[in-house]
Structure formats: C-alpha cells, structure tokens
Image (spheres, coloured by chain):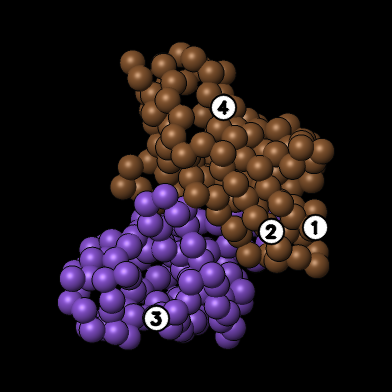
Chain colours: A brown, B purple
Amino acid sequence: AQSVTQLDSHVSVSEGTPVLLRCNYSSSYSPSLFWYVQHPNKGLQLLLKYTSAATLVKGINGFEAEFKKSETSFHLTKPSAHMSDAAEYFCVVTEGSGGSYIPTFGRGTSLIVHP
Amino acid sequence: NAGVTQTPKFQVLKTGQSMTLQCAQDMNHNSMYWYRQDPGMGLRLIYYSASEGTTDKGEVPNGYNVSRLNKREFSLRLESAAPSQTSVYFCASSVESGANVLTFGAGSRLTVL
C-alpha cells in the first residue's frame, strides 16, 4: 500500500530565505508524486508533479522538487521565500501499474513566512 | 472555464438532518473524487468514481453515499448528519485515475450542530 509522510507540520522562514518542505513516501510500484498548495480559504492548486521523467521537477512560482528513489523522498524547495508563499502544502502519491491509482495525501505542512 | 463547481459553499445542519453536496465538472474528466479536510489530517478520500457508472469507497466512507449521475456530476449525500462530519469537503476530478492532475473545487464548509 502507498503512503506519504510530511515530516513537518509547520515550517517558519523569513522572507528571502530558502524554503524546504520535506516529504517521504512508501510505494511498492513506480509512484507518481505531486505537490499541491492551498492558500487560506481556497481550493488546492497543483505546484508540480513527477511521473518518471526527469528527477528534478520544476513547478510554478519558483518551486522545485527532486525525486530520490534511494531515499524515498520528494522534498519541495524554493531558493527565496516570498510573503505570498504562506500557505498549506500537500505531498501526494499515486502508484503505477499494479498498484493503487488513487491519490493519497500527506497531512500537510503549513508554511509561515515572516517579513 | 468553470472547472469544478461545488454547491453549497456553506451549510449548517442539525444532528440527524440529511443533505446532498453537489459537484459538477465541465472538463470532460472521467474520474471524480470526494475528500474531506480536517485540521492536521490532510485530505482523506471518502468516495471516488473512476469512470461514469462506477463508484468505490475510499478511506472514510462511513456515513456517506455517492451518486455519479452522469459524466459531469458526482454528488455526496449525508443521510443522517453527525457532529463528526463537520468538515470542509472538496470535490476533485481528473482525466483518468492514476498519474493525472487533480482539479479541485473551492470547497464546501459543513457544520453539524
């Protein structure tokens, strides 16, 4: 069965400093991995996705994530935080052929950005 | 482009009342999903429909029923609401199930007193 663990429930950074949101996954099949962002009182929006192409994936708003199979990780990074990045971030896994195609969400990481 | 439309956006119920959350998508997607979001729990899947005419239970189906009325519409029904069903509900759709991007509605905030 697939699962995903977001290692931090809250991350606090200062504006202009790097962002790191950590995600580990478990999957018996070739996984597809996603990051979604949810701004306050809004729906969820796709940031980026990995589907077995390049291991370094670039997304919107300067975010990127690297798929590391040996570490079963898919951490989200951004070189310089902006106030508008303050939001809830979700790591999501689905499995490939033979596994569960249903998206499984992590519990979320709240990113707080200080001026 | 409307995308995924959910109604109502807000609803207050008393324990034991019933209600239906409506969801419609105009993207010709095959798969549709209902999630609930609770603080610290992420999104948990209630029911999904991989294609028109099929529905399956997700992680937390108890107390809910669904209907895939046609390819566009996927409704979620609470037959006898309980305070534990107080939550924010999200409908989502994707081209197919699997490695496809989910498109979400804006959410429906339900309070059960």
State how far apart marks 3 and 4 are (Cα).
Answer: 38 Å
Label 2: which residue?
A2
Q: Do dots 4 and 1 share one subunit?
A: yes
Amino acid type shown at disc 1: Tyr
Label 3: which residue?
B63
Q: Do dots 1 and 3 share one subunit?
A: no
SS label for mark 3: loop
State the image coordinates of residue B48 (x, y, percent, origin top left): 54, 73
- Left or right position of A15 against A1: left
Measuring 44% from the left and 34% from the top, which residue is drawn there? A10
The quadrant in which the N terminus of chain A is found is: bottom right
Disc assigned to residue B22 = none
Disc assigned to residue A20 = 4
Query: Mark 3 near mark 2, Cβ–Cβ under 8 Å?
Result: no
Q: Do dots 3 and 4 share one subunit?
A: no
SS label for mark 4: strand
Label 1: which residue?
A29
SS label for mark 1: loop
Q: Earlier in the sequence, mark 4 or mark 1?
A: 4
Pointer 4: residues within 10 angstroms few (<14), some, or many (20+)? some
State the image coordinates of residue A100 (x, y, percent, origin top left): 70, 66
State how far apart marks 1 and 2 are (Cα).
Answer: 9 Å
Quarter location, residue A21:
top right
Vertically, is A37 above or below B108? above
Q: Chain of mark 2?
A: A
Query: Mark 4 near mark 2, Cβ–Cβ under 8 Å?
Result: no
State the image coordinates of residue A7 (x, y, percent, origin top left): 56, 39
Amino acid type shown at disc 4: Leu
Q: Earlier in the sequence, mark 1 or mark 2?
A: 2
Q: Chain of mark 1?
A: A
Vertically, is B113 above or below A23? below
